[in-house]
Amino acid sequence: MAAIEAAGQGVAWKDGDPGIGPTYLFLDPDGHELELYWETEWYAAPDELRPSLKNQAQAYPGRGVCVRRLDHVNYLAQDVPRCGDFVRDVLGGRVNEQIQLDDGTISAQWLHFTNKGYDLVYTRDWTGTRGRLHHVAFAPDTREDIIRAADICLDHGVFIETGPHKHAIQQTFFLYVYEPGGNRIELCNPVARLVLAPDWRTITWTEAERAKGQAWGLKTIESFHTHGTPPVA
Amino acid sequence: MAAIEAAGQGVAWKDGDPGIGPTYLFLDPDGHELELYWETEWYAAPDELRPSLKNQAQAYPGRGVCVRRLDHVNYLAQDVPRCGDFVRDVLGGRVNEQIQLDDGTISAQWLHFTNKGYDLVYTRDWTGTRGRLHHVAFAPDTREDIIRAADICLDHGVFIETGPHKHAIQQTFFLYVYEPGGNRIELCNPVARLVLAPDWRTITWTEAERAKGQAWGLKTIESFHTHGTPPVA
Amino acid sequence: MAAIEAAGQGVAWKDGDPGIGPTYLFLDPDGHELELYWETEWYAAPDELRPSLKNQAQAYPGRGVCVRRLDHVNYLAQDVPRCGDFVRDVLGGRVNEQIQLDDGTISAQWLHFTNKGYDLVYTRDWTGTRGRLHHVAFAPDTREDIIRAADICLDHGVFIETGPHKHAIQQTFFLYVYEPGGNRIELCNPVARLVLAPDWRTITWTEAERAKGQAWGLKTIESFHTHGTPPVA
Amino acid sequence: MAAIEAAGQGVAWKDGDPGIGPTYLFLDPDGHELELYWETEWYAAPDELRPSLKNQAQAYPGRGVCVRRLDHVNYLAQDVPRCGDFVRDVLGGRVNEQIQLDDGTISAQWLHFTNKGYDLVYTRDWTGTRGRLHHVAFAPDTREDIIRAADICLDHGVFIETGPHKHAIQQTFFLYVYEPGGNRIELCNPVARLVLAPDWRTITWTEAERAKGQAWGLKTIESFHTHGTPPVA
């Protein structure tokens, strides 16, 4: 918090979110609102959702896609490295992978705080807007769950933007859909990929490498660079 | 029908099952009731269950185990080969695999009418009772669905008898559970296994081979030879 | 054979293919060479390839993609329905699904002889050439095997044309690659899809329906309509 | 290192392991030899093993089980909590899950240093021997890879001790086999399970809970408590 204040990005303490205690609101350099919290209350499942195995929080839902956890958030930003530097220097993240265009611009950065390959991503907003969301990603258990999710979305009229396929960057198996409000949701499975080396070196992808598309050759969809929320007027 | 009557196993024509026209009721030699039908009415999904792809009958349910089809029925019988002969000679099935005990007894037969490895199975009832059911099997899309099903059953208090594992015979990936009424249900995935050779030769397993258990070594559970429905008084 | 001769498409008896006895060579209306055989010799695995389970022909290879069987063949043809009629009327197949363009032309037909959704496919050759191959398809056990195959192809420099994705027609999970000689190979997984209804009705897809692309929205790749083997001079 | 020396468990610096620099050898309280290293040399793949995606160390092997990483090591120990305390207090691990018998004895502990659920496990050796190995675990990409592995082991004569199934503790999908020298190898898939809560509380399983067997009911195999390496004379 001291570091955030020193960086001039702090806003205020807030209270009122159930189960996580007071939160400290601040802004990243692109204007996205972020909050820190510490006093988490452990979830106690009601009887009808009690799990059979005590090392899990709740019974397996068995409805719809069955995501297990929030995996990461991807923001659009006017100035990607300025945001990445803030996350690295002030919040303690590390840049795991990034894209550098031929003119030297860093157009995307994948940052992580944990052993997961990435927790927070910044991607350049081609519309030049500030403060927008690219997508929120949820992880179900398996790649097969992602494929099932595609079937479920297809039959429920949920718009599928692209996938399932595997990203070249981070090698995540993915499906992108829009929820009814227009926000892009990624359903992702990172397989067994973890960053365990303490001296991991940032992977930098060039324009030529990115031109190959996703891992197995699917071209990156055009709307990926422009569709964000809120929509640009 | 003529063949069934000639075999003295015919009972009567019935009417009243929705969507399949009149049915011809008959008995197999162990006393199980079977019916033949022909005038199937094609299912037309109501609006809310209409599929996105016109080559499927209904939208993907996205709830629970999501089985796709009835795969096979397994009866318990006092005299297995007598039943198998009836199915082969009168109904036109073929014996794909079977178990022969050291004393020469055929204790189980897997029969098929289609390119599936088996549609109807007879297993010896160790209690000596006639006319009982061993299990009904439903196939979801994948092996991963069977594993998910185990999680769903675990958290919904559905009794898991054995599995998931792979059968040695027919190599089906399986999970056996009891529905609340006590009937055994198999959730099965036959992977890509089809009998396409017109001259397929019946595979006969010996007692010694069966003593190895299921494909990867799981011992066949004791209740498999005795639990059937209705229960023996 | 008599039916083929009557149709004027017979060529000659041949001998020399190991393990399948004499073969009867004939042509489909587009000029593709086909052969019929009957006297198949059952494969006996040498010691080092002997399987642990006696109901499979050979030990699981555990190398590369591990396909289990030839699934289907897809020919390009100048006149699709003429080929489809021949297969239906002379060879005894049935048309399971087909594409009909707005001008009435049947541009593709999926035919089957077994309970599999399709064994033989004819697709219109946009180059107008006769007698070419679109692809040969092999089925491994699972969809996961198809995804693994994509990784294997990627790292072995095998050209991936499109996929993995799911076809709208037949709903097969697919990956298309070119083998070093230029022939297109499909690795396919039909999941649990079988045609078991004796009164299955041909599904006809319109141009508008096909414009939606594959099952989850992937656009059909342009080379699909033109790349065939042998290449057009 | 200072902490290890202070605990009286240090042995000596060594050199000679390729690629990891000098190592500091020490013993855990049960006498297992452990080494610390820091100066890791990054692997540079030779041409024939070069990956297509630059964020992976080597091309996907495409042979056999295709494990991706060493996942964890499980030691047998005379005195489990003494080892666990050492790992926690001296090495900085945390106890994620454990088993406590009715008489109060801690008979197994799962410890982690990273966000993985466990990196090091101690299990009571029922033979009372010190310093033995229970198993080493390797993680392939998916659960389907574990199932494939069972097929590969079956057809290559590799002894399968138990599995595939899912552990109740840690919920890992597992397969246990013995390599030719007799060491137990686990092939494991932890699905998407990570410990991300900084205030995770140790889960303690009772004897009654463990009596239920593994997640879906498979009984824990007897040899699990006695087979270790080296064998007891």
Image (tube, coloured by chain):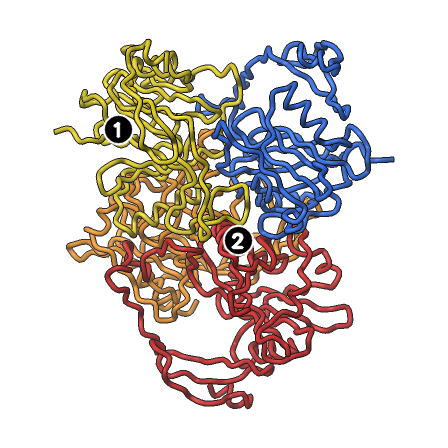
Chain colours: A blue, B orange, C red, D yellow
- Location of the N terminus of chain B (image quadrant): bottom left
Which residue is found at the position 42% from the left and 51% from the top?
A: D62
Q: Front-most of B232 and A184?
A: A184
Report whether A126 appears left or right of B164. right
Q: Chain of mark 1?
A: D
Q: Secondary structure at mark 2?
A: helix
Q: Nearer the viewer, mark 2 or mark 1?
A: 2
Q: In what element is the residue under mark 1? A: strand
Q: Compared with residue B167, is residue A1 higher up or lower down, i.e. above or below?
A: above
Q: Is any part of residue B4 visible from this angle?
A: no
**Pointer 1: residues within 10 angstroms few (<14), some, or many (20+)?**
many
Q: Quadrant of residue A128?
A: top right
Q: Is residue D11 left or right of residue C217?
A: left
The image shows residue C148 at horizontal and vertical percentages of 48, 50
Residue for point 51% across, 46% down: B67
B130 vs A118: above or below: below
Question: Do we see residue D41 in this rendering?
Answer: yes
Residue D133, label in figure? 1
Label 2 sits on residue = C154
User: Which quadrant is home to the C terminus of chain B?
Assistant: top left
Q: Amino acid at mark 2?
A: Leu
Mark pair 2, 1: CA separation: 38 Å
Residue at image location 39% in from the left, 51% down from the top: D63
| Location of residue A91 in the rendering, given as x and y in whole percent from the top left corner | 64, 19
> Could you say which quadrant of the image residue D129 lies in?
top left
Where residue C135 appears, x then y in whole percent? 55, 68
Q: Is residue D156 above or below residue A172?
A: below
Picture quadrant of residue A111: top right
Name the chain letter of the residue that bears numbered label 2. C
Most foreground residue, C169 or D54: D54
- The amino acid type, in three-letter code, at marker 1 is Leu
